[in-house]
Amino acid sequence: MTAAPAGSGVVVVKVGGSEGIDYDAVCQDVAALHAEGRRLVLVHGGSAETNRVAEALGHPPRFVTSPSGFTSRFTDRATLEIFEMVYCGKMNKGLVERLQRLGVDAVGLSGLDGRIFEGRHKTSVRSVEDGKTVILRGDHTGTVERVNDRLLRLLMEHGYLPVLTPPGASFEGVAINVDGDRAAAAVATALGAEALVLLSNVPGLLRDFPDEASLIRAIPAGAVEDYLEVAQGRMKKKVLGAAEAVAGGVGRVIFGDARGAEPVRRALAGEGTIVS
Ligand code: ADP
């Protein structure tokens, strides 16, 4: 296999963890692009599966909404361990296995490995409950502030395709739950990627969710934050990630649909919502 030169034409693909995502289609598409000499990094989520496993283990998920309206998973130690089982285990190895079967030498790593995703540990979180703000302690979350791009470049230069997943590492080496979309944005920025493709189970950013006919086709880079209002729930993190990536110099960010064939190729060809 001949690898393309370092730093050029990297595409970072983030595939979410929502119901309806066709992981086989994502892997087939990633494998085909890799075979064409594209340099790719795959970042994935696993929220729906984590919720199922957490329920089954008798430790149901708890979501908190911050005073500024962002929703996140409250991650106590037990939740972190379940999260690792699903994200680093079932989800990560499931994607690596699919890619290996397709002839791609995929290497699955969490953000903890080699401190690929590194950031500050937030031990408490403010949550709005019944109109009142409460503080929850014992949280294991953080925001990616630094990416070990050296390790990623090393892998890609030798033809390996990194498959990355939260958690990340705190500066003290503690595992922290980090947002996958914003982690993918940080990876794309660190690698100077030409594109960041954020795949989920919707056609893109919808002006009037869930009306799929209200797809927003294009967002100018300078105006991304204006669209935070349009996005609800977890979609807000994607919009924030997109804003961070374009501000960080990533060529374009595309919100694409992972429910059909060739989701990455379709997004790169202009389907979905393009931020550039
Ligand atoms: P994933 O885990 O696949 O990355 P998320 O659950 O984080 O997905 O975010 C995608 C979800 O955001 C969609 O499934 C949809 O339910 C929700 N959503 C909220 N507001 C919007 C919007 N304006 N446009 C599109 N999706 C939205």
Image (tube, rainbow, N blue to C red):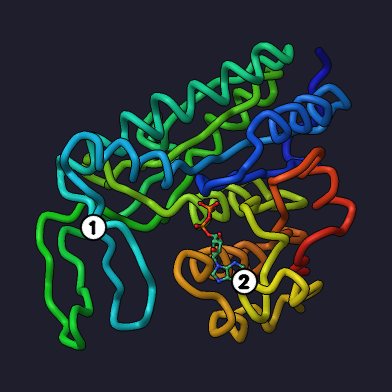
Residue shown at the point (78%, 32%) measured from the top left: 29
Query: Where is residue 131 drawn, in percent x and y?
Result: 20, 88
Mark 1 and mark 2 in contact? Answer it, CB < 8 Å: no
Left or right of 8 in this view: 158: left
Point out which mark residue 210 bears: 2
Percent across and percent down for residue 180 are: 48, 50
Q: Quadrant of residue 213?
A: bottom right
Binning the other alpha carbons within 10 Å of mark 1 as few (below 14), some (14 to 19) or many (20 upward) gives few
Q: Amino acid at mark 2?
A: Pro
Q: Nearer the viewer, mark 1 or mark 2?
A: 2
Asked if residue 178 lies left or right of residue 212, the reply is left
240 and 28: which is toward the camera? 28
On screen, residue 112 versus residue 56, left or right, reads: right
Q: Nearer the viewer, residue 21 or 223?
A: 21
Mark 2: few/some/many CA within 10 Å (<14, 14-19, 20+): few
The amino acid at mark 1 is Arg
Quadrant in which residue 139 is drawn: bottom left
Q: Judging from the image, what secondary structure is the residue with disc 2 in?
A: loop
The percent coordinates of residue 21 (x first, y second) are: 62, 43
Q: Nearer the viewer, residue 79 or 40?
A: 79
Closer to the N terminus: mark 1 or mark 2?
A: 1
The residue that label 1 is drawn on is 62
Q: Vertically, is 249 above or below 152?
A: below
Kind of element beneath mark 1: loop
Q: Residue at x 68, y 74 (%)?
A: 211
User: Mark 2 near ligand 1 (CB under 8 Å)?
Assistant: yes
Q: Residue at x 26, y 35 (%)?
A: 82
Does 195 sit above or below residue 239? above
The quarter of the rendered structure image containing the C terminus is: bottom right
